[in-house]
Image: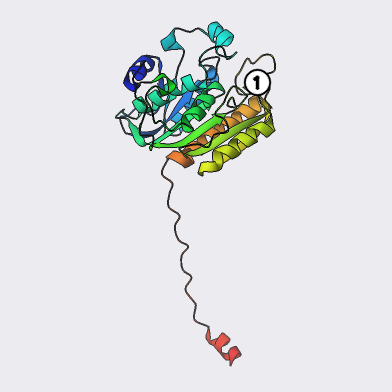
Amino acid sequence: MDSLEDRWMKLQPHVQVFGPEDDAPRPAVLLFHGCGGVRSHITGYAEAAAQAGLRAFVIDSYGPRGWARPFALATVCTGVIFRGRERAGDVLAALWGVARRRDVDHTSLAAAGWSHGGWGIMELMSSPLSRAGEFGLADPQGTDLSGLKATVLVYPYVGIGATARMKPWKRCPKTLAVIAEQDHLTTVENAHKVYDAVKACGVEVQTWQAAGTHAFDEPGGNGPMKYDETLTKEAYGRFVRFLQAALLPQPEAKPAPKRRARAASPAQSAQAG
């Protein structure tokens, strides 16, 4: 069984890093791919976040395990292996590891997950982290996640296999939830019920109901999954704006200048008299 540090050391060589070329500690977003592995749209979101001044880390859960895409499609996507609770171990270890980088502001982190990646994030958020062995990790208990200020869930898997989907979260970062209206893995009604349950701990959930299929932002979709370029552009924009609002310092609103009363002119005084 891995420790947090052991898991991070396995993941780290397969992490793609995006962001400004400096050593300044900046807010960061960690991106967790769907069951098909790291695809071009995931790195596209990371590049968009980097252009907005954030650091972005694409976490590959398959590289360290030696899993190729065909294997993942046949086993992970079908729910045979590596379900959300196991994936949550990677999410926790990556947050732990990235927070220790000198070029990252550990008080201002976000976790973003697509489909299977979103499932892993939701499992982590609803866990008390109170015992050894959770998520296949020897020492998850008491891990400090106070720096996690936001999560982004893009058509996360919230079907019957996600047994913790209705559990209230133990941590309450601001959340952007993308619901695909034509998602073949869940209904819109079920997705809204899940997010209503999430809100029970006071989570601020911003939902966007996109008129597309599961994986509408992934080029080359097949079967029930259809790529939609227009929706994808909107998704990128919403992703960046949400992270900017959640992680970057916002300028303080300046108070409106006080209006000084003007003295009445002699003509006005004469009329008043």
Q: Badge 1, how many Cα within 10 Å: few under 14, some, many 20+?
A: some
Badge 1 marks a residue whose secondary structure is loop
Q: In the rendered image, which quarter is residue 76 located in?
A: top right
For this orientation, the residue located farthest to the front is: 131
Quadrant of image for the C terminus: bottom right
Q: Nearer the viewer, residue 183 or 201?
A: 201
**Residue 249 locus on image (x, y percent):** 41, 44
Instruction: Tell me if 58 is positioned left or right of 102 in this view.
Output: right
Residue at position x 56%, y 11% in the image: 80
- Image position, residue 56 (x, y; %): 43, 27
Residue 45, relative to residue 78: is it above or below? Answer: below
> Quadrant where the N terminus lies?
top left
Label 1 sits on residue = 227
Q: Quadrant of residue 196?
A: top right
Image quadrant where residue 73 sits? top right
Q: Position of residue 95 (x, y in %)?
A: 39, 28
Q: Is residue 268 visible?
A: yes
